[in-house]
Image: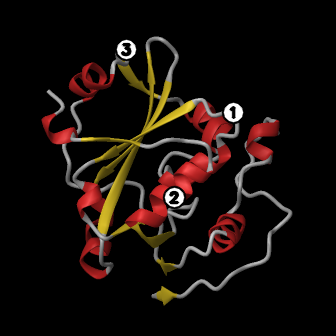
Amino acid sequence: MIEQRPSLPRDATAEGAVADGSAASASAASREQLFARLAEFGIATRTYEHAAVFTVEESHGLEREIPGGHTKNLFLKDNKDALFLVVAESSTRVDLKALAGRIGAGRFSFGKPDLLMRTLGVTPGSVNAFAVCNDTAGVVSVVIDARLMRHDSVNCHPMTNTATTNIARDDLLRFIRATGHEPRVVDLESAG
């Protein structure tokens, strides 16, 4: 199912608040607010509705139907408490130890769901490059797979894993920078 998303008005409600009602999660951008922000920047996207997908394996069927580079996203914390969002092409093998050494990070572990919600405003399975707009404190470093940057367009979940939004590569980078994050493009395949 394909849905072209027009410019939408800013929605005053936030989706996905966690049970503890923390301020960070309650202020997380909803899907509609994301689309409104993209429209404010004049960024055109195309969104495809689908059943929820939680893993790269579950999304393989979508990759055949939706053009562009497809992503897998890792929310990581190192042993120095630094946070990272790694946006990789879905087929890239990410060696966490090699990546940590390459970017000067400590030993990586996956960030816990409550930290993910407080920081990026999304749940596991819905981690996406757009979620950095919720990191208003600027504590997450964004690392992007160089292999993904070979595509003219990139596919990301729009805050929820029940849809995929196709965006031009350069527009995705422009959006990330507009959130106050400077994406670091790294060749993840040769991170060793």
Q: Residues within 10 Å of mark 2 (few under 14, many from 20)?
A: some
Q: Is residue 112 visible?
A: yes
Disc ID at residue 33: none
Q: Is residue 149 above or below residue 99?
A: below
Mark 1 vs mark 3: give the one in front.
Answer: 1
Q: Residue at position x 18%, y 31% from top?
A: 191
How far apart marks 1 and 3 lie (CA) works out to 21 Å
Q: Tell me which amino acid carries mark 2.
A: Arg
Q: Residue at position x 29%, y 57% from top?
A: 149
Q: Give the mark, 3 or 2, whose residue is nearer the N terminus.
A: 3
| Image coords of residue 156 (percent x, y) | 44, 62
Q: Which residue is mark 2?
A: 174
Secondary structure of the residue carrying numbered label 2: helix
Which of 182/142 is in front? 182
Q: Is residue 122 visible?
A: no
How far apart marks 3 and 2 lie (CA) works out to 28 Å
Disc ID at residue 137: 1
Q: Which residue is mark 3?
A: 106
Decide if residue 65 is on the left or right side of residue 110: left
Mark 1 near mark 3, Cβ–Cβ under 8 Å?
A: no
| Image coords of residue 141 (percent x, y) | 49, 33
Quarter holding the N terminus? bottom left
Mark 3 vs mark 2: give the one in front.
Answer: 2
Q: Tell me which amino acid carries mark 3.
A: Gly
